[in-house]
Amino acid sequence: MKLDAKIPAGPLAEKWDNHKFNIKLVNPANKRKFSVIVVGTGLAGASAASTLAELGYNVTTFCFQDSPRRAHSIAAQGGINAAKNYQNDGDSIYRLFYDTIKGGDYRSREANVYRLSQVSVNIIDQAVAQGVPFAREYGGYLSNRSFGGAQVSRTFYARGQTGQQLLLGAYSALSRQIGLGKVKSYERREVLDIVLIDGHAKGVIVKNLVNGETEKYAADAVVLASGGYGNVYFLSTNAMNSNTSAAWRAHRKGALFANPAYVQIHPTCIPVHGDYQSKLTLMSESLRNDGRVWVPKDIETARKVSSGQLNPSQIAEEDRDYYLERKYPSFGNLVPRDVASRNAKYVTDEGRSVEEGSEAVFLDFSEAIGRLGKDVVEARYGNLFEMYNRITDDDPYSTPMKIFPAVHYTMGGLWVDYNLSTNVPGLYALGEANFSDHGANRLGASALMQGLADGYFVIPFTIGDYLASQPLNDHPSTDHPAFKEAAEQVDEEIKGYIHNNGSHSVDTFHKRLGKIMWDYCGMARNAEGLKKAKGMIQELREEYHKDMKVPGSDSEYNPELQKAWRVADFMELGELMIDDALQREESAGGHFREEHQTEGGEALRKDEDFAFVGAWEYQGRNQQEIMHKEELEFEYVELKTRSYK
Amino acid sequence: MASKAFKINLKIWRQKGPSEKGQMKDYSLDTVFPEMSFLEMLDVLNENLIAEGEDPIAFDHDCREGICGSCGLMIDGLAHGPHRKTTTCQLHMRSFNDGDTIYIEPWRAKAFPVIKDLMVDRSAFDSIMGAGGFISVNTGSAPDANEIPISKDVSNEAMNAAECIGCGACVASCKNASAMLFTSAKVSHMGTLPQGQPERMRRVQAMVKAMDEAGFGNCSNTEACEAQCPKGISITNIAKMNADYLKSTVVSEVQL
């Protein structure tokens, strides 16, 4: 298969404008003859659905939550990047582009990232016009803060709830279109198949989660904005119900899945506290501005701390190892996420964890409290300290926080071209569901930017190019036999889960899958471990389909049944992540192969062999997938080794 | 540090479906740890029920970090439980003692029919939003974000109202099942900002109308909604909405 990213010709800065002029348009009167399905109502889905409806298309949205407003974009805390240069500190579209390419460890497409930087400025305008209450200065103008991987202040924020406010903005735009009748919103629905007619995506098969009915919906095009796959690991900062099923089933229908091994592990989360743990909570990256990360220098002291015989405050300064400051004197505690996470793993692997039966390092504010005073620290981080206290019952003003890395975001996803189209005609992927803009590592405050860029400013134009080529008066219908066939397959699969009558709940298998993935395909990977994990997952899958148990029926609200199909899909994707991690014989961003590191233990990229996107093609159940390469061409940015020493 | 497990008794509302009759059922759990979240406690109970071949308890939940607004349980008669400014998912079992009996019920309101067990249908909130909870600005037509300076105080005031997570605790806590706090938070978020002025009168009329049509009750100023709101949304928003509503019906040109 030849992968054509359809990157427009011409200079980098002119590609998007040229492209918008060159692609086909659907005239206003004809737009209302076309319908589009949007799966997912997070930032990407809600912004796409509302904008497409404003243009005149008839839009149908699906979400598994009880309201579009609850999609997991809502949980993003820190902010959204945009190259406004309001701070006059030397920011520019080119600088945001450059920082994003570098932050992604040179594994993303120049043209896509440049466009992302260009439209970032429009996102802020749009959000403010919708009433998003971004933080402001006394003069009434917008405030900015700094984030990791950048030397300018370009992050816009709304307290610690930027994702919530941006999503409520997109949801209000969506609500307006729902009120006007241009969008039909279906809640508590999960998409379980993409229907292809003559090779084109023309509809979806949907489970009604309330009554269990299988529903069919047809449209002229399908847009997937269904989020990432961090929950493969069971424990992550994702919402409990975030899943990959819509995207994975699109993959099974022929859409390529790109770079599945690129996973972002966030360094500052609250550690695991027991077998019953259901999810992990992120503590904002901003804490590393004043908090100092450390563990005791020797294992014996660490043991005494974790068992409660010693208080952290009793450990003398010279017995502490501020390992980030020691190894990276110029960036210190503010090294990028992947570096901070990996080093936490190194010290706990040595036996220096500060939490018994778990893994944790200290994030200590005592120096900051001494330097700034408690009031200043409280003003900066009070709400985070309160959240930490609520969860752990520890008071971070008097004792250091305990933190550990956790799975947070997935850079991989469905392969898309410059138009955000998958290789299946009529099927698009936006936001975290696609792979396109973050390379091997995403910078903080860039996920919100990408979701909204895709939804507000890219898909509304590029989808027209496809729809303009579709018949004006002959639209797909659910009467087509492809719908019946797909729906019957879904029903058969569901019946299989219901009648399986095994002896273990779905969660017990999901936890085992998560542990395999975390141990062998987490912060550090090696060929031996990956091969072992692949075998373990294959065995686990077999056991799962024999021994899993779903209570209740398929004609009622049945959350255990929902878990059953999600976990079946996570297992298949988990195996593909391992294949991808195995083939990538280099270290890049979130993908760290122990065989490929510098003498100092830093990631060692191999640009001559691995400057490509690995896009996997499904070959049928239990068949080894085939990888296709999209070579990445860097015309503007010179590939360098990232250094934070 | 491993802490000791303790035992709790639970009385939980079970209801098969919207038209079925529900009842309180007794359960007990002796592997409760102080570090567990309230919802993790229910997860463990559900795992036990599955192992015993019983139907697990249905409840809404998703982000489990207090922001999505999915979860919402009446715990011992209080929406989201005993602590102020805390969602159900942020409540931890250290707030309870060995041997406690905990009553767990769904939100109860005519406009929030029970779907199953502890899950209710809150789509009435979406209808209120669809009627007017927006600023009508098509994508692409926005001016530069710094074109209209907005004072920090005004922006903060708007943000205070905009923090609502739409969980429905206000409705559940109100003896009249009124949605005034939810609706007024959105009305006042947008009505406070300059961008929201052109539609201010139309918005308040449309949203109040949708709220009434959805079957929510009236406000009688008991302030229970504010006390139980996990985000501390102030009832001054209700006063602002009432003032706008009066103005919109008496002196504005808007006729819906």
Image (cartoon, rainbow, N blue to C red):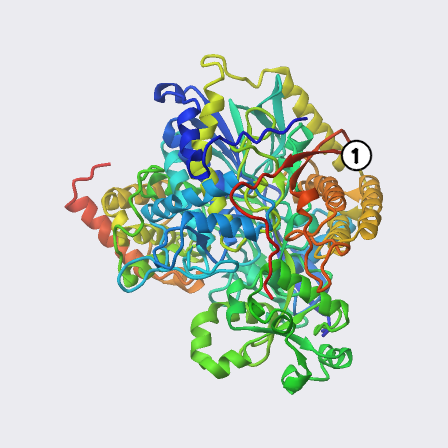
Quarter of the view holding residue A339: bottom right
| Kind of residue at badge 1 | Gln
The outermost residue toward the top is A473
Q: Position of residue A327 (x, y in %)?
A: 64, 70
Does the image show residue A272? no
Quadrant of the image containing the C terminus of chain B: top left
Q: Position of residue B200 (x, y in %)?
A: 25, 46
Does the image show residue B141? yes
A454 to the left or right of A634? left
Q: Position of residue A613 (x, y in %)?
A: 64, 39
Quarter of the view holding residue A616: top right
* Residue under numbered circle 1: A624
Q: Residue at x 49, y 23 (%)?
A: A466
Q: Chain of mark 1?
A: A
Vertical side of B20 occupied by A281: above or below? below
Instruction: Tell which of A195 and A364 is nearer to you.
Output: A364
A224 to the left or right of A487? left
Q: Position of residue A141 (x, y in %)?
A: 29, 58
Quadrant of the image containing the N terminus of chain B: bottom right
Instruction: Tell which of A449 and A269 is nearer to you.
Output: A449
Q: Residue at x 70, y 43 (%)?
A: A609
